Image: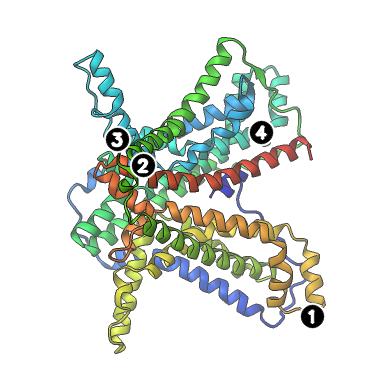
Amino acid sequence: MTEAVASGVAPAATVRPARRSRGPGRPLWSAAVLVLAAAVAAPVVTVVVEATRAGVPDWPAGLVRMVVTTVLLMGGVALGTLVLGTGLAWLVTAHTFPGRDVWVWLLVLPLAMPAYILGFVFLSTFDAAGDVQVWLRDILPWFEVSVRGLGGCIVVMSLSLYPYVYLMARAAFTEQAAGTYDAARVLGAGRRRALRRVLLPLARPSLAAGLALVMMEVLTDFATVQYFGVRTVSLGVYTVWRTNYDFATAVQLSALVLMFAVAVLAAERLLRGRARFTQHGRGNGLVREPLRGLKGVLATLACVAALAVGVVVPLLQLAWWAVSTLRREGWASVDPRFGEYLINSLMVALLAALACVAFAVVVSHAQRMGGGSLVRTGAQVTTFGYAVPGAVVGIGVLLLLTQLDSGLRALGVSGGTGLLATGSIPAILYAYAVRFVGPAYQAVDASFAKLPASVTQSAMVLGCSPRQVLTRVHLPLVRPGLAVALVLVAVDAVKELPLVLMLRPFGFTTVSVWVYELASENLWRLAALPALVIVGLATVPVALLFRQVRAEDRARRGEG
């Protein structure tokens, strides 16, 4: 996802060879893409079919409240991220002030802080029993405010997710509007009017894409909302499945979550409208206005506040908890199962990353071999799993395995699929592949797109088979893209929570699940060390993002 966010555009178009002769082996590559597309789509299709067949479900109590709460949460977070992300993007793009060159990159850092970690740190600090309110009550004994609830959840998610909108808005302001902005200024428009009447309408497609990413993350999350006592439809899926083992109702709720996701994508298309903007000429673009004196201080404070609340203070709090606990209780305070949980996380993440990158290579290579429109459609299908909420993927995988188990038993296979039907590591890996093959494909296909078509054509003319072209030509040349894809998927897999909670076998725990369980029991100090591990790993793709966006900026400025 960070790759897509960094570029602010759809995956790069694949460069196809000019000649598409039907050599031996190509139908197999095309068939492989279609099989992968079917495997990715199967959980979602199964949920839809099962929900359609089930008839009128036995909806859980409070369904209307769950739906209303989900709508309010998505709307509130969308508004918060829009204001915060767009405002900060405008501030660093159109102005110069102390530290501006540093803040422009550091403001992306909240991407490394998962919302479910920021959520429990926020509660421990600002809730009635937190340090802030305890200090305030020493001064004002009557003061007590609860930050639990919808409002607190919206604040936390907005602070954690605003970089999606920030990156999209900044890319739009710097790339799309230079000449048009100059024309507006020449015609007498002030900076604010040019922003309101020219830049924001031009940035509408980018802002819509950023908001769609934000709302998909909101739909996927259920740990943060659980901390704040906000019952959403996604939380309802997990609760119904894990608490009541009511599979039929969980499937119906999953279909409802899927409808929310479809509504988000439709809203994103609606916001884009028929916008097709082409920038002719580079123009001078946004000439940065210097902010001096009090204005410069306020601009710096705005960046400091966003970064401090979203990253610095939570990190310091986690580090303080971890260090103070170690100093007071020694290494005995560290759960002896920490190593086991960390190995579980890394093992699952590594296997998922290898699988996703392998699938991405197959899809990109098949397109490179000229698979036609059917293969291109299949390739697009393999990427849509990332837009599906984790609760839907989890229930879909369980449903598929249950049906497979029933089918095998009907065929006389003793034991069916065994433990696969109730959750297993292969089930987790399958669900991870459905969710994360999209980001892997974007990174790998971007590297494939940089290869000249003549390279592939030359290898084919010299008699190489499609497999030899892949192993001897393509793979050595796209190694950077493979490495980026591996890192992106592995880090996403380490942070992933809903799929592991729904599909894990008995006794299998990862670091993310451990943090969730400790935070759910208010054991925040014990959750600090594993939370720091997750944040440290999540910093890796953010660093890659820094590097990529900075390289694009330098290239745009012609600095080589």
* Residue pictured at 79% horizontal, 73% vertical: 459
Question: Closer to the N terminus: mark 3 or mark 2?
Answer: 3
* Residue pictured at 65% horizontal, 44% vertical: 548
Whether residue 372 is visible, yes or no, is no
Q: Amino acid at mark 1?
A: Gly
**What's the mark number on residue 519?**
none
Farthest residue in the top direction?
293
**What's the mark number on residue 463?**
1
Q: Amino acid at mark 4?
A: Thr
Q: Nearer the viewer, residue 513 or 6?
A: 513
301 to the left or right of 505: right
Question: Closer to the N terminus: mark 4 or mark 3?
Answer: 3
Q: Residues within 10 Å of mark 3 (few under 14, many from 20)?
A: some
436 to the left or right of 197: left
Q: CA distance from mark 1 to mark 3?
A: 63 Å
Q: CA distance from mark 3 to mark 2?
A: 24 Å
Q: Secondary structure at mark 3?
A: helix
Q: Amino acid at mark 2?
A: Ala
Q: Disc 3 marks which residue?
A: 150
Q: Nearer the viewer, mark 2 or mark 4?
A: 2
Question: Closer to the N terminus: mark 1 or mark 4?
Answer: 4
Farthest residue in the bottom direction?
412
Residue 231, given in percent of the width and then of the height, sits at 26, 44
